[in-house]
Image: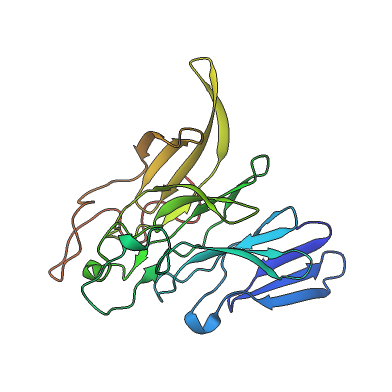
Amino acid sequence: MKAGTIVRGTRDGYLLALDADTGRLLWERAAGDADKGETFTMPPVIFDDLVIIGPAGNEVPIKGWVGAFKLKDGDPVWRFNTVPRPGEPGAETWAGATDAPTGGGAVWTPFSLDPAEGLVFVATGNPAPDFFTDARRGANLYTSSLVVLDARTGKLVWHHQATPHDLHDWDLTQVSPLFRADVDGTARRFVSMVGKEGLLRILDRESRAQVTAVAVTRRQNVEVPVTQEGVYACPGPLGGVQWNGP
């Protein structure tokens, strides 16, 4: 909410702006493509005069994106594709030996915002198909990743892929909190990230290096691909950390 306006997304891909005092509809916009399976499950972030949101739908599969819309009327301002389209940086990390549809990289949990720096921190979901990985050879950027965008322009500032070429449907789900801490007498800025892979990671926001990683659940056979015969792996697609942080 900002300046008396409440903005929310809907399951059929609409953004709705409501008057906070009366509930009156101020505007609506079909921001997502419901015919493609794009649905909004997360609250948007409002930065200055922009509403920032992205659709869920990894398993459909949609091709994920994050977009900004004007707070006053819902007009689109920018879009960043979390699954790069042909010719975009990162598209070379997708190669397939089949004609199976690919996608993923959708967003379904809240973003984090650094208003002082004008940065939005995004947790992206798994690549698709989830387990038929011959259809998507390569690292599959920017899925299962922390993606940091310029909130004003949507340009990629930096990213950290938690699970390159994800084999187990291990969405990244949390990119919070953003925090500061003194380390050996030096003030440093950090971001924590965790997802269904069950590793709580701390990254330095200036060097962008991973400082530490701690398992928050049992991890077993994490590098073993799924087979038709069956593989025991932990955590599973519903394990690790989902909606709520550890």
Of all residues, the one furthest to the right in this rendering is 21
* Residue at position x 26%, y 80% in the image: 99
- The number of callouts visible is 0
Among the 4 quarters of the image, the one containing residue 62: bottom left
Rendered location of residue 93, percent (x, y): 31, 60
Question: According to the image, what is the colour scheme of the structure?
Answer: rainbow
Left/right placement of residue 1 relative to residue 106 reads right
Among the 4 quarters of the image, the one containing residue 94: bottom left
* Along the line of sight, the residue nearer the viewer: 39 or 69: 69
Of all residues, the one furthest to the top in this rendering is 185
Rendered location of residue 103, percent (x, y): 38, 70
Query: In the image, is residue 81 above or below residue 24?
Result: above
* Residue at position x 48%, y 15% in the image: 184
Quadrant where the N terminus sits is: bottom right
Left/right placement of residue 169 relative to residue 189 reads left
* Along the line of sight, the residue nearer the viewer: 175 or 116: 116
Of all residues, the one furthest to the left in this rendering is 229
Rendered location of residue 129, percent (x, y): 31, 71
Of all residues, the one furthest to the front in this rendering is 87
* Residue at position x 71%, y 72% in the image: 16
Rendered location of residue 14, percent (x, y): 64, 76
